[in-house]
Amino acid sequence: MKVVQTLAELFYEIPLYESVALPEDLRLKLIVLGGDDATFEGYCPECETVRPFKIKQHCDFSRDPLTRVTWQDIVSRVTQQTCILAAHCTFDESHSIRMVLDCGTLELMKIGQYPSLADIGNSEIKRFRGVLSRLDMSELHKAIGLGAHGVGVGSFTYLRRIFERIIQSRFDEFHQSEGWDPEAFRVAWMDEKIAMIRSHIPEVLYENRKIYAVLSKGIHELSEEECLAAFPWLKKSIIFILDDDLRKRDELRQRDEIRKALGDFL
Ligand SMILES: [Zn+2]
């Protein structure tokens, strides 16, 4: 069973209806089951950027005066404690992410979330419309939708295709000026490809290149669980590269503007 290490992981990575474990020493356990306040950093779909979030409330349905009537039937049917966990954006408190959790002693299951993981994920990738092809954008949407429903192999396959195309496009763009060998690149494992094009991708990918070797395995060699476990870091890697592209594009645009302004002046 997957062990949840952080609140951000619980809000942004765990799909519905997947039983997950809480480590015994985790503050998360106190926050969800007890009465502690906490903050974490995460993507706010309304601000469309990363913000600090604060947990503002958590309660058993049966103790919540606003919901006690509506939820009585449900409460009577659940044997474990059911909790609502709401995180509020510290930029604007009306921005929130709410979850309903079925909590055991050291394990829990997310049984509801709003906005959904897919809504949050799709909002997070909107900014890449200018740097991703229509195909990549469409497959990224599909990957996020499947990942939000716990479909491991499907979501992993789409992310892998996008990642491979990004790495291939870097190779195609620079192989002549860098003198890279196309045949050596074609037969290399993904971690070796990343090492080859190191100077044209974010350094963090090179530093962690061993993890990408899994992308060279056949899909039939991977289990549903392995694919689900790879989903967060593969998605983060893609987002990291695309943010780097956006930064470079912005820098180029600013340089052009300065050059043009200087040209007008001289
Ligand atoms: Zn916000």
Image (tube, rainbow, N blue to C red):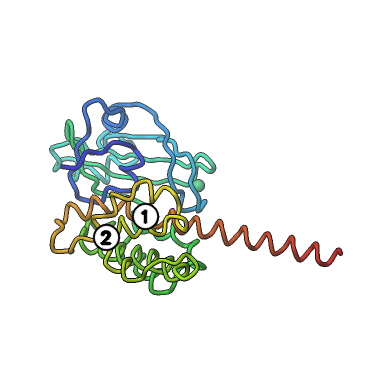
**Label placed on residue 195:** 1
Q: Residue at x 30, y 69 (%)?
A: 186
Q: Residue at x 25, y 42 (%)?
A: 101
Q: State if disc 2 and disc 1 touch (CB < 8 Å).
A: no
Mark 2 element type: loop
Q: Residue at x 30, y 55 (%)?
A: 191
Q: As rendered, which of 114 and 23 lies closer to the eye? A: 23
Mark 1 element type: helix
Q: Is residue 204 left or right of residue 16?
A: right
Q: Is residue 251 above or below residue 54?
A: below
- Badge 1: few (under 14), some or many (20 or more) residues near its Cα, within 10 Å? some
Q: Dividing the image into 4 quarters, which one contains the C terminus?
A: bottom right
Amino acid at the residue labelled 2: Trp
Q: Position of residue 240 (x, y in %)?
A: 44, 53
Q: Is mark 1 within 8 Å of ligand 1?
A: no
Amino acid at the residue labelled 1: Ala
Q: Is residue 181 left or right of residue 213?
A: right
Q: Is mark 2 within 8 Å of ligand 1?
A: no
Q: As rendered, which of 134 and 169 lies closer to the eye? A: 169
